[in-house]
Image (tube, rainbow, N blue to C red):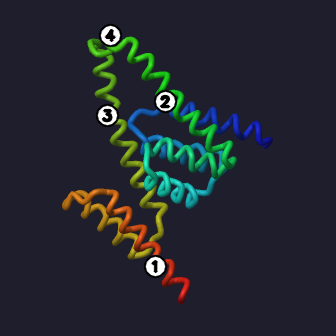
C-alpha cells in the first residue's frame, strides 16, 4: 500500500473511531486495537499492548497518546500527526456544535436519556479493555502479582496512579538489568 494511502486510511480510521466513540480513552484504545490489529493487521497484538502502556504512562489524554503511538508505529512522524488530527477533530467539532446549542441540549429529555444509556455501554467497553489487556499480558507469576498489587494499592489504599506507574517503571528497570547480567 502506498504511503499516501496508508496516511489517508490512518486519518479516516482515527477520525471515524473518535467520532463514534463515547466513554473516553480506554474505549477508543479497544477500538484502535480491533481496527489496527485485528482488521488491518498493521500492528501485532503484543506491540499494541506496549503502545497502550506507553499511552497510559505519558501525560495527557490516553486517546491522543494512543493515536500518537499507533500513528508513529504505522507511519512515523507524519503518521503520528495525521492520527492526532483524526482523533482530535471530531470532539472539537462536536463540542463546538453542542456549545452553540447548549441550552437546547441541556433541556432535551431525549438527549439526557441517550447519554444515560451510553454510560452502560461505556462500562462494558472498559471491562473489555481490561480483559483484553489481561489476556494479552505476560503470563508470569510476577506479572499477575504486579497487576493485583497495583489494583490493591490504588483501590484500597488510594495510592496515586502516577506513583504506581513510577514504581512499575523502576521495577522494570531493575528486572531488565538483572536479566542482562544473567
Q: Earlier in the sequence, mark 4 or mark 1?
A: 4
Q: Secondary structure at mark 2?
A: loop
Q: How many marks?
A: 4
The residue sitting at 48% across, 45% down in the picture is: 29
Mark 1, residue position:
175
Mark 2, residue position:
20
The image position of residue 14, as x and y in percent, is: 57, 36
Q: Nearer the viewer, residue 115 or 10?
A: 10
Q: Earlier in the sequence, mark 3 or mark 2?
A: 2
Mark 4, residue position:
104
As measured in the structure, the alpha-carbon distance from the residue carrying label 3 to the one carrying label 4 is 21 Å
Residues marked 2 and 4 touching at CB (< 8 Å): no
Mark 3, residue position:
119
As measured in the structure, the alpha-carbon distance from the residue carrying label 3 to the one carrying label 2 is 14 Å
> Where, by quadrant of the figure, is residue 118 drawn?
top left
| Left or right of 132, for residue 67 | right
Residues marked 3 and 1 touching at CB (< 8 Å): no
Q: Secondary structure at mark 4?
A: helix
- Determine if residue 12 is in view: yes
The vertical placement of 109 against 30, above or below, is above
As measured in the structure, the alpha-carbon distance from the residue carrying label 1 to the one carrying label 2 is 40 Å
The vertical placement of 108 against 15, above or below, is above
Q: Secondary structure at mark 1?
A: helix
> Where, by quadrant of the figure, is residue 163 drawn?
bottom left
As measured in the structure, the alpha-carbon distance from the residue carrying label 4 to the one carrying label 1 is 56 Å
Q: Earlier in the sequence, mark 3 or mark 1?
A: 3
| Left or right of 150, for residue 177 | right
The image position of residue 167, as x and y in percent, is: 36, 68
Foreground disc of the pair 2, 4 = 4
Amino acid at each position: 500500500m502506498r504511503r499516501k494511502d496508508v496516511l489517508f486510511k490512518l486519518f479516516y480510521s482515527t477520525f471515524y473511531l473518535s467520532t463514534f466513540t463515547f466513554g473516553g480513552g480506554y474505549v477508543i484504545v479497544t477500538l484502535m486495537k480491533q481496527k489496527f490489529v485485528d482488521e488491518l493487521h498493521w500492528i501485532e497484538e503484543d506491540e499494541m499492548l506496549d503502545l497502550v502502556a506507553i499511552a497510559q504512562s505519558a501525560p495527557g489524554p490516553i486517546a491522543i497518546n494512543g493515536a500518537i503511538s499507533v500513528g508513529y508505529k504505522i507511519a512515523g512522524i507524519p503518521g503520528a500527526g495525521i492520527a492526532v488530527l483524526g482523533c482530535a477533530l471530531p470532539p472539537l467539532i462536536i463540542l463546538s456544535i453542542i456549545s452553540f446549542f447548549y441550552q437546547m441540549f441541556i433541556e432535551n429529555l431525549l438527549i439526557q436519556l441517550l447519554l444515560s444509556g451510553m454510560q452502560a455501554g461505556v462500562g462494558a467497553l472498559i471491562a473489555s479493555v481490561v480483559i483484553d489487556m489481561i489476556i494479552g499480558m505476560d503470563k508470569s507469576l510476577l506479572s499477575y502479582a504486579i497487576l493485583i498489587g497495583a489494583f490493591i494499592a490504588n483501590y484500597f489504599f488510594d495510592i496515586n496512579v502516577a506513583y504506581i506507574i513510577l514504581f512499575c517503571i523502576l521495577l522494570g528497570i531493575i528486572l531488565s538489568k538483572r536479566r542482562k547480567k544473567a
